[in-house]
Amino acid sequence: MNNDQKFVNPGKNQTVTVDGIEYRRLCIKTHVITIDDNIVDVAEKYAKPLAEAGDTLVISEKAVACTQGRAIPLVDIKPRKLAVFLSKHVTKTPVGIGLGMPETMEMALRECGTPRILFAAAVSVIGKLLGKSGWFYIVAGDRARSIDGPCHYTLPPYNKYVVLGPKEPARTAKEIADRIGINVAIIDANDLGCVILGSSKGSPSNDTLCKILKDNPLGQTNEQTPMGIIRVQK
């Protein structure tokens, strides 16, 4: 394996062209990140040695959340009857459980508030009648969208956890950027799409970042690459 290939996940391309500009995506493997880690220190350890002027570091929201104590053991979550009922009506996708299990729906009710989740559910029903999808998360917001439950490919120990979205992602991005000296964005990405939860000043636009990350180069299974560097190809 050459030096370039070690930064590419299987089935992904290292380069992508967006709006006429070619970008490299360098996926960075780390140890399994937990509450015992400081995400700023992790970024400094793994990303800073690779960083060049003009780069943008993208970090999975799940990695950030785990360092903030936002990973909740399944055994500690007691879903109410409403959570059980609502979870049964969530559309299942091949890229993650989302709110389709009682424990993740329970955490959505706690994170977003019961009235908002009920309103989002009602709007979702109307959307489905009109042949539209995605209305639930438009109303429920990023805090609901960012909740991850365990799947068959989830890396242990998080195959027994629900992981919430990170707190203050924009502030976290700035703290990391100040430490390592390049732009930083906290992302929620999977094979269906990408959302930028927070970024440091000077980062590419959210639209540009999402286009660059459209194919989810960091991966969604056991790659163990929760961060990556985006670099304009010269």
Image (cartoon, helix red, strand yellow):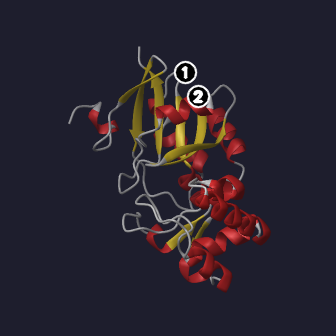
The circle on residue 54 is 1
Pick whichever, 22 or 57, lies toward us: 22
Q: Amino acid at mark 1?
A: Gly
Q: Secondary structure at mark 1?
A: loop
Residue in the image at 42% along x and 67% along y: 151
Where residue 22 sits: x, y (%)?
Answer: 42, 20
Q: Is label 2 in a helix, a strand or a loop? A: loop
Q: Position of residue 103 (x, y in %)?
A: 58, 76
- Above/below status of 217 relative to 105: above
Q: Quadrant of the C terminus?
A: top left
- Give the residue at mark 2: 182
| 174 or 58, nearer to the observer | 58
Q: Residue at x 39, y 46 (%)?
A: 29
Q: Residue furthest left?
A: 1
Callout 2 touching callout 1 (CB < 8 Å) = yes
What is the three-letter code of the residue carrying label 2? Ile
Give the side of residue 13 with respect to residue 65, left or right. Answer: left
**Which image quadrant is residue 198 in?**
top right
The image shows residue 66, relative to residue 2, as above or below, that is below
Neighbor class of circle 2 (other Cα within 10 Å; few <14, some 14-19, many 20+) is: many
**Spatial separation of the CA atoms under disc 2 and disc 1:** 7 Å
Residue at image point 45% right, 61% down: 93
Q: Residue furthest front?
A: 130
